[in-house]
Amino acid sequence: MTDHLTPPTYVEGDPRELTLLDINARFMPHEQFRQLVENIKRDGCLTSTPLVWNDATSGRRIVLSGNHRTLASIEADLRTIGWLEITEPLPRQRQIALQLSHNAITGQDDPAILKELYDELESVEWRQYTGLDDKALDLLEKVDVTGLGEANLDFASVQIMFLPDELERAEAAFDAARSTASADARWLAGLTQYEPMLDALETSRAAYKIGNSATALGVILAVFERHLAELADGWFDATTGEPTRGGTAPVESVLGVRDLPVETAAALRRAINRLVKDGSVPEAEPWRALDILAADPGAAEPQ
Amino acid sequence: MFQGTIPGPMRSIVRETAQQWPQGPVYIPCCGNFTIERSLASMGFALHSSDVSIYTTAIGRWLTGQPAGIRLREESHDQLGWLAESMDDGVGTVATLMLGTRFLASVDRDGLWHQRVVRSYRDQWETKHTETIEKLSRTELQLASYQAEDVRSWLQTVPSDAPVCSFPPFYGGGYEKLYEPLNTHFDWDAPEYAPLSDDDVVSVLGAITDRPYWLTASNHDVEELRPHLRGVIKATPRAAPFYVYASKARTRIVAPRQPIEPVTVPRLRQGEQIESPLTLSLLKPGQFNALRSRYLNPHIAPGAANLAVAVKAGGRVIGVFAMSPSSYTPDEVYLLSDFAVAPTSYPRLSKLIVLAATSQEAQLLCQRAFSRRVRAVATTAFSNNPVSMKYRGLLKLTKRSPATDDAWKFQLQYQGPMGGHDLATAFATWTKKWGTPTTNTPETAP
């Protein structure tokens, strides 16, 4: 069997009667396809010819090359187009080779000459017709406009990552998550806390009718602040009045607040100073004054 | 603040066109954010500008050494008295107004978010005001004159042979709304003017184009100016185009181009049996564009998706879905696009994509992407049938109306729950109900 093809013949017919490829490696983005349709409408005909194989076995005329042109000609409502038609039997291997070669062997543009020719086109319509544009060809002048704008608010971005419990998976997940976005700080939490976190955000949003996640988080933190004393559960048994563990506890979980009125703070400061002065409390550990106050509330009173 | 800003390619066209204009004065009515002036800066023109807004006038007067003439309103002193010290009738007033565009709309508004915005600006005011003044002081833009005046009367004072360059507003009301928060809290010698009527637009265009050198642009394709069309700029397939008209200019076009990134993962092919497990993979925008261009109807103008996901079965891509957060219902997502690869041996494959898009795994991805609880999904189907076969049995038809797109008969709204099943259950359900393959094998061609 020779490798030569019998020269295809030029045939005209209704593009709707052609069979388009089921599997075509070539695709055309929406905007290019729309331009192709516009061009065909403007021309009233196809200006390049698809290659069609007339498969005598199935009776179908299969478009090996020019599928988008054929589809666009239907879209442009052409009743007749011309194509090159192969009528001899074509093994599947050769069909694939023909299709791929038509897609791949297309030559290359010399960018300088391409720009030169494109720039000769004077009307906007002909420039659009080419499917090229001035920005893509880098023909637009670079303009650096001087800034006339206001400063942005300072803000910190925080990424909250929810990780699985197992150390190995958690480390891998953290590495992967860290690469997804830049942040000023990253907070880690267990994956089991993800759902309660979403619920808490949603409830805050619903309660205050807010859509912004950071604002909703602010609500959650405000509620937390109001319930600081409940954190005593972490170290204190309210029934026995005894600590449940060693170490230290946050002062705010004792008092329920982070700040004191200055008058109260000053009175406390004075009492501590007195206790330090009379040697009841070491200077380096002024908080031990609270031990004395707790044991004997009257001890800090001025004598 | 972005008002009056023109896209990058337009600035290039302005600068390129102005190279053909004689050295001397150039007049810019409706100058907005001075983008035309900034594009022409350093070309040696004497730039004369005008506009009617408080924002533009503050900048214009400062650039021409005039007092801003803008004061905090008496009735705003209680709330915004902390701004008073920043109002120096010069660059300090300009910086105050510029920063004001960011937060004044939130003053007096209910809601924690608005309170937070105002509080943040108040807390950081001194620093941000100083930074803005420093930023403004670096500008090289110089104006020969600025006049707070309506385009109709100002154009009558412009010499008939001087170039005019302007992108006047072709829509009524928009700018007034934009500057409303500034006008609420600041008082100034505002010029009186009436919004442009259609006749006014024609007469303004006439006054601009009736001269040897001019350039204007619009979002409208103005029939009368067609012979002077010099450029079309369309940023995205769904964006409104800008039409550029000029007395004399090079023609320039900028067409939308989707970024395309190849997806090399194999696809399910005809004759191949679908295999579990079903998995989801996030797609980058370019990858989503590539798959959409390949498999979706080319009639549908692509829009940007917030979250695009490939559905894979046994490692092969079987389809794609894309989601956006709902603007109206907090716990709902909008299924922007869903499609199956083709051809395959499974005529109901698209139902599996919908099942994957409503799975617990998809729900987790949506929640992660949108930082909110997601319980429901909604979508719109365009169809010539009164129901969509793809969504039938999976989502609930909530509304049927005539299609807004001529290519279709019906516009069908569907809604359903998210996360009612996992991917494994989705695959099992689909296999049992809709997974019967056709017996056809490909007859020809790859």
Image (cartoon, coloured by chain):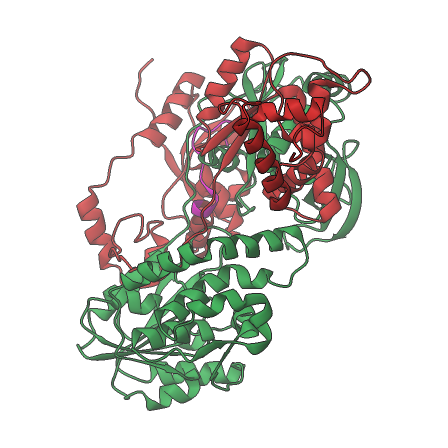
> Is there any visible trace of residue B373 in the rendered image?
no
- Looking at the image, is B157 positioned above or below residue A155? below
> Is there any visible trace of residue B286 in the rendered image?
yes
Q: Is residue A189 left or right of residue B402?
A: left
In which image quadrant can residue B370 be found?
Answer: top right
User: Which corner quadrant holds the N terminus of chain B?
Assistant: bottom left
Q: Position of residue B254 (x, y in %)?
A: 36, 55
Q: Is residue B158 left or right of residue B288?
A: left
Q: Write down which chain is painted green.
A: B
Q: Between residues B330 and A142, which one lies in front from this camera angle?
A: B330
In which image quadrant can residue B395 be found?
Answer: top right
Magenta residue span: A20-32
Q: Is residue A30 magenta?
A: yes
Q: Is residue B98 left or right of residue B387?
A: left
Q: Position of residue B167 (x, y in %)?
A: 40, 71
Q: Write down which chain is painted red.
A: A
Q: Is residue B74 magenta?
A: no
In which image quadrant can residue B51 be found?
Answer: bottom left
Dominant secondary structure of the magenta stretch? loop
Say which residue appears at 25% left-offset and 86% top-offset.
B161
- Looking at the image, is A36 positioned above or below residue B355? below
Say which residue appears at 50% left-offset and 87% top-offset.
B192
